Image (cartoon, rainbow, N blue to C red):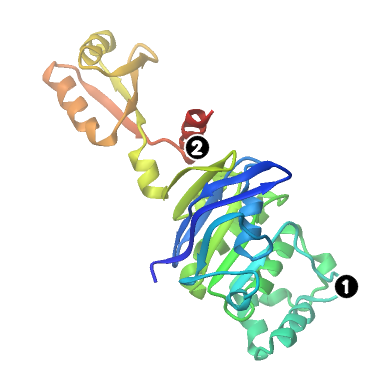
Amino acid sequence: MEYIIETNKVSKTFNGKKILDEISLKVKQGSVYGFLGNNGAGKSTTIRILLGLLKVDRGDVTIFGDKIAISNATYKQHIGCIIDSPVLYEHLNAAEFLQLTRLLKNLPKTEISRVLEIVGLADNKKLIISNYSLGMKQRLAIANSLMGQPRLLILDEPTNGLDPQGIIDVRNLLKNLPEQDNCTVFLSSHLLDEVEKIATDVGAIQQGKMIFQQSLSELINDALGCLSLEITEPKLALDLLVSKGFSLDIQSNSQITITNIEKQHCPSVHQLLINNNIEIFQSRYQARSLEQCFQKFNQQVN
């Protein structure tokens, strides 16, 4: 199975307002898929449909290779999820809290130790949850969702409200989960910088429509970046490069920046300058960030 989640032209309307407009997702097995969008774009509605909490108006949803239906919820046994803020019994310690899930799912006793080790809370299993930091509570919630080794983990804004260290801890946890626990991760977020540090694949929704979907590496590499050069004769270089169709700015007496250039064209720029007796002291290419890519596609929609 190549894709663990597939949706085909899924649409959903509330009170006459179209929230999702023919959404088509493809989430690869073993990936960390970042589902992007501004608040109100339709991310949470999509997640509720994937979890069988909402019924689609039109379109199909396939998970684990089978089309899902609210009337048949067996596929949910293989999904872990956190929607909104995690609900924890804070008067218990971590081991006691996870024991409740273990009994409900009829899991072996070793499962508690297994998930606590994955999220880095094994040494704090006897600590009362009310004494946990927000980041620790979020990791405990993820541990709870991993009970029973689900094939798919669905998280809605998993780093919201966390302090910097909490964000780093959750980031590292999610990034390693596919390899560590054989689990595909689908996470929604509006924090593009965080998603760029975690995800292998990304898709973005705006005004209920998909605006892009691609592997993160391909998306970044396909986007036009900037080439900053420290050189002799910047004015000569400016005239030379403009005549070849490049867009650029003079930053200082020795530095120019070529905007909107593909990385593969950088060597030809270097050669052009050298052939015209312009010395290059430093060259630095900067690819577009995920945030810049999102803004570009978002502007095209608007």
Residue 102 on image: x %, y %: 71, 85
Residue 263 on image: x %, y %: 28, 35
Instruction: Give whichever of discs 1 and 2 has the lower sequence position.
Output: 1
Can residue 291 be seen?
A: yes
| Kind of residue at disc 1 | His
Q: Residues within 10 Å of mark 2 (few under 14, many from 20)?
A: many
Q: Is residue 53 left or right of residue 11?
A: right
In the depicted structure, whether residue 65 falls above or below residue 22: below
Residue at 56 percent across and 62 percent down: it is: 174
- The disc placed on residue 294 is 2
Instruction: Depth check: give the residue in front, 250 or 21.
Output: 21
Instruction: Depth check: give the residue in front, 194 or 71.
Output: 71
Tag 2 secondary structure: helix
In the depicted structure, whether residue 101 falls above or below residue 79: below
Residue 29 on image: x %, y %: 44, 67
Q: How many marks?
A: 2
- The disc placed on residue 91 is 1
| Kind of residue at disc 2 | Phe
Q: Is residue 218 left or right of residue 265?
A: right
Can residue 169 be seen?
A: no
